[in-house]
Image: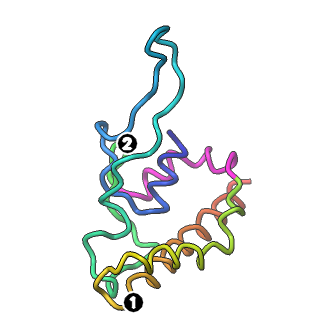
Amino acid sequence: MQQMMLLDYLICNQDRHFGNFGAIRDAVTLEWVGFAPIFDSGTSLWFDQYASKIKALADAPAKPFAATQQAQLALAKDGLQTLNLSALNGRKDEVLAIFEQAHFGEPDRANILADALAARCEFLQKEVLISK
């Protein structure tokens, strides 16, 4: 759950309600297998904002455990210690290459989104250092 909330912070997902995450159980034994892969993240990446209005570190609405991204991130802080956030370093060019294929319709949206994700990654890495 913490990893899901951290991902939702990174991508600024605003609609992770109780109906769009789940668990997997073995159909025969009904034993717990784990969480389902992340799905239904359509209200992420500042989907409702013009690129020029995106502020990467500004707080945004969140669900289902808190009303804002920052409040929900605070609930998942313990999970930061278990992740190798340095694996996110230097990925901006890869992210940009993917976003550039999307043809967003706004000339600089791919760059702005890549910058915003990089800023959120840096913020999370600083949070890890602060909490140690």
Identify the residue at the far front of this view: 101
Q: Nearer the viewer, residue 127 or 12?
A: 12
Label 1, secondary structure: give it: loop
- Relative to 3, residue 10 above or below: below
Label 2, secondary structure: give it: loop
How far apart are the alpha carbons under marks 1 and 2? Answer: 33 Å
- Please state the horizontal and vertical placement of residue 79, each as a whole percent of the image: 61, 45
Query: Dot 2: few (<14), some (14–19), or many (≥20) neighbours within 10 Å?
Result: some
- Relative to 85, residue 36 above or below: above
Magenta run includes residue 70? yes
Magenta run includes residue 63? no
Q: How many marks?
A: 2
- Please state the horizontal and vertical placement of residue 24, each as a whole percent of the image: 46, 26
Residue topped by disc 2: 65
- Please state the horizontal and vertical placement of residue 34, each as a whole percent of the image: 53, 28
Evaluate if marks 1 and 2 touch, with contact meaning CB atoms under 8 Å apart. no
Residue drawn 43% across and 15% down? 27
Q: Main secondary structure of the magenta part?
A: helix
Which corner quadrant of the image does residue 47 belong to?
bottom left
Q: Depth-wise, is mark 1 or mark 2 nearer the camera?
A: 1
- Relative to 61, residue 99 above or below: below
- Please state the horizontal and vertical placement of residue 124, each as a whole percent of the image: 60, 62
Q: Which residues are magenta?
A: 68-83
Residue drawn 55% across and 46% down? 3
Identify the residue at the far left of this view: 48
Q: Is residue 59 left or right of residue 86?
A: left
Q: Is residue 74 left or right of residue 45?
A: right
Residue topped by disc 1: 108
The kind of residue on which mark 2 rests is Phe
Residue drawn 41% across and 58% down? 69
The kind of residue on which mark 1 rests is Asp
